[in-house]
Image (cartoon, rainbow, N blue to C red):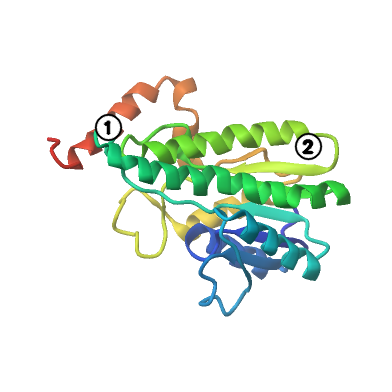
Amino acid sequence: MDIDNRTVLIVGATSGIGLGLARRFAAAGSTVIVGGRNTARLADLETVTIDVTDPSSVESARDAVLAKHPGLDTVVTMSGVMQLEDLRDPAHFAIAETTVDVNLLGTIRVIDAFTPHLIERRGGTIVTVTSGIAFLPFPLMPSYAASKAGVHAYTEALRAQLAGIGVEVAELVPPAVATAGQENVNPSALPLESFLDEVIGLMSANPTPREILVEGVKMHRWAERDGSYDELVARRSQALSSLPGRS
C-alpha cells in the first residue's frame, strides 16, 4: 500500500495505536479522517463522530465522509474494548455483550457501510484490526479473545468475497503495545513508536500483506503450528489468580 497518497478513514483512532497510525499516515502525505466517539481533543486531524454500536451513527458518519471525500480509498476499523471477566459469575455477560457489540459487530457495521463505495470504485483497501489474543487466548479476557478471533474469521471471508474486484483486505494483528498511560502495566509490551515503525514498514509493501505481523506477535500467531500453544496458554492462565476468590 502506498501510504503517502491515500484518503484514509480510521475508525476507533482517538487514542493509542489508532491515533498513532493516523498521524503516521498524515505525516506521509495522506488525507486522514479519524472516527470515534470522543473527537474534540484532536485538533491536528480531521474527525468524524461515530459510535460503532449504533447503526444510524455509522450511516451518518459514512455519508459525511463520502460527501467530503468521494475519493476515499482506505478504511481501517479498529474500535475495541478490552475488559477482564470472571466466567464463574454470570454478571460477566454484560461485559461479553458489550465486547462483542463493539469489537465484532462494530467492525462489521463499518465494513458494511463502506464496502459498496469501494466496490463501485473498484479499488481500495480495508484493514481490520485483531490481536495476538485472537490466536493465543488470554483467559482473563475471554470475550475479547473470542471477538477478535471472530474478526479474523470475518476478514478471511471478506477477502475471499471481494477477490478480483480490486479491493485489498488486510488484517493488522497487534501484540501488547504500551500506549499512553499503559507503559507500566505490561513490561513485555512493545513501545508504541517501535510498533508503528514496524507496522508502517510492513503496510507499505505492494501488495499489502494479508496479515500485518510484527515480529513481537508471531509467537502468538503461530503458537499452534509451532507446538507452543498449550504451554503458553497455561502460562497465561496463571493470571487468573488475580480474580477475587482465586489463589
**Percent position (x, y) of residue 182?**
35, 59
Q: Seen in the image, is 75 located left or right of residue 181?
A: right
Residue 227 placement: quadrant: top left
Q: Seen in the image, is 229 located left or right of residue 128?
A: left
Residue 56 placement: quadrant: bottom right
Q: CA distance from mark 1 to mark 2?
A: 38 Å
Tag 2, which secondary structure? helix
Of labels 1 and 2, earlier in sequence is: 2
| Residue 4 shows in this picture | no
Question: What is the crowding at mark 2: few (fewer than 14 residues within 10 Å), some, or many (at least 20)?
Answer: some
**Percent position (x, y) of residue 231?**
32, 24
In this view, the residue in front, 192 or 242, is 242
Badge number at residue 119: none
Badge number at residue 162: 2
Query: To which residue does mark 1 refer?
Result: 237
Residue drawn 71% across the image and 60% down it: 62
Q: Seen in the image, is 28 located left or right of residue 241?
A: right
Residue drawn 32% across the image and 34% down it: 139
Q: Quadrant of the C terminus?
A: top left
Say what amino acid the circle numbered 2 marks.
Leu
Tag 1, which secondary structure? helix
Of badges 1 and 2, the one in the foreground is 2
Residue drawn 33% across the image and 28% down it: 233
**Percent position (x, y) of residue 228?**
39, 23
**Percent position (x, y) of residue 25?**
66, 63
Residue drawn 51% across the image and 77% down it: 41
Say what amino acid the circle numbered 1 marks.
Ser
